[in-house]
Amino acid sequence: MVCVPASIADMFDNGERGTVLVLFAMCIIVGPMTAPFVSAFIVANESLGWRWTSFMIGIISAPVIILILLFFYETHHPIILVEKAREIRRRTGIWGIQAPHDRFTFTIQEVIQKTLTRPLRMLFTEPILFLVSLYMSFIYGMVYLFLTAYPIVFQKGYKMKPGVAELPFIGIIIGELFGGVFSIFQERKYRQKLAKNGNRAIPEARLPMMIPGAVAFPIGILWFCWTGQYHDHIHWIVPTLSGLFTGFGILVIFIPAMNYIIDSYLIFAASAMAANTFLRSAFGGGFPLFAEFMFDDIHTNWSGMVMGLFGVVLILCPILFTIYGKRLRQTSKFAFDLNE
């Protein structure tokens, strides 16, 4: 989760990076939404059982590890130059040839500072990184909260069988696919703006793309929770269709936000994404812990009201950073525009 966006930043420029990140984000967001009904049907199958949910992950992961070991090479530019200099020294015997990175030696303290301390310091001292990461963390937490909320609504409320009760996640998946297509279309418009600006990238130009998703996401939450509460009177398809809005919102928020962080902290993209992933994973792990208690105590409708209103407040995030983002980057130790 940390290395891939940073590696993408190494390999692709501003014009291409957005589309590649769309594909990456669709993998990490659509995947968790397919897991519930796949695993539920595996568990429901008496000839397989719950252990096969882990066996399937292992079967899929094993060839991926082999492909990474065989075909995935270093992408960080300073390290590539070090390896190139080493190869030239070996071929020519001229041992004075060095890459700039060869001159650096790091103590254990410096390594710890760069890999652990810097991301945390950036997270809590950089307003751009903290607030955008908070927004992404809320979205990510809601993705995993839905893993608890959907079975409560469709299995307990609508009395669907395990496996069938998880099929409404397909609504979110379809919404995410729409969001991915919309994001790719927006990236084309962004490249046109980039060309008009002489290929000088402005990170804040990413943020207007986020606003349609920021509006759609709380609509989907409120729709799902208020219709899912009254399962005796409302057909199950109604809360299922809310997934079109939440899925669309998830992708359309996630992609510009990730692009904005990478564009703002290009040199420190890995540290920025490490900080972002730290907070995002904490939300993703924490939300399911309280979800069932919240839905039982204040019911589905008011749980959705709390989450939906929080999502409405966070709409201010892309709007305010569109206005004040450049000013904040100019005062930052880590975020700046290389073109300025």
Image: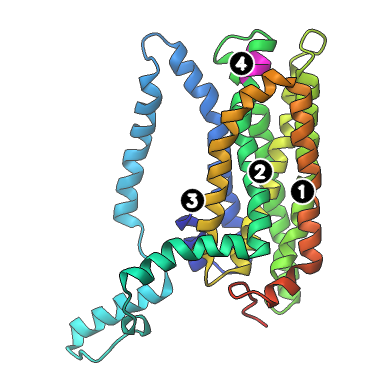
Residue 11: tell me if it is visible. Answer: no
Report the number of numbered marks: 4
Q: Distance between the residues labelled 1 and 3?
A: 23 Å
* Magenta-drawn stretch contains 97: no
**According to the image, label 4 marks what residue?**
165
Circles 3 and 2: CB distance less than 8 Å?
no
Residue 288 versus residue 72: which sits nearer the camera?
288
Using residue 329 as the reference point, say whether residue 39 is left or right of it. left
Query: Sequence-wise, which precedes: disc 1 or disc 4?
Result: 4
Residue 330 versus residue 34: which sits nearer the camera?
330
Q: Is mark 3 on a helix, strand or loop?
A: loop
Report x, y in % for residue 59. 34, 32
Q: Which amino acid does label 4 sit on?
A: Ala
Main secondary structure found in the magenta portion: helix
**According to the image, label 2 marks what residue?**
138
- Mark drawn on residue 1: 3
Q: Is mark 4 on a helix, strand or loop?
A: helix
In the image, which is nearer the foreground, mark 3 or mark 2?
A: 2
**First to last magenta residue range:** 151-155
Circles 1 and 2: CB distance less than 8 Å?
yes
Q: How crowded is mark 1: few (under 14 residues within 10 Å), some or many (20 or more)?
A: some
Q: Distance between the residues labelled 3 and 4?
A: 29 Å
Report x, y in % for residue 178. 70, 41
**According to the image, label 1 marks what residue?**
314
Circles 1 and 4: CB distance less than 8 Å?
no
In the image, which is nearer the foreground, mark 4 or mark 2?
A: 2
Q: Residues within 10 Å of mark 4 (few under 14, many from 20)?
A: many
Residue 155: tell me if it is visible. Answer: yes
Does 68 sit above or below residue 195?
above
- Residue at left offset 59%, top offset 27%: 147
Q: What residue type is labelled 1?
A: Leu
Query: Sequence-wise, which precedes: disc 1 or disc 3?
Result: 3
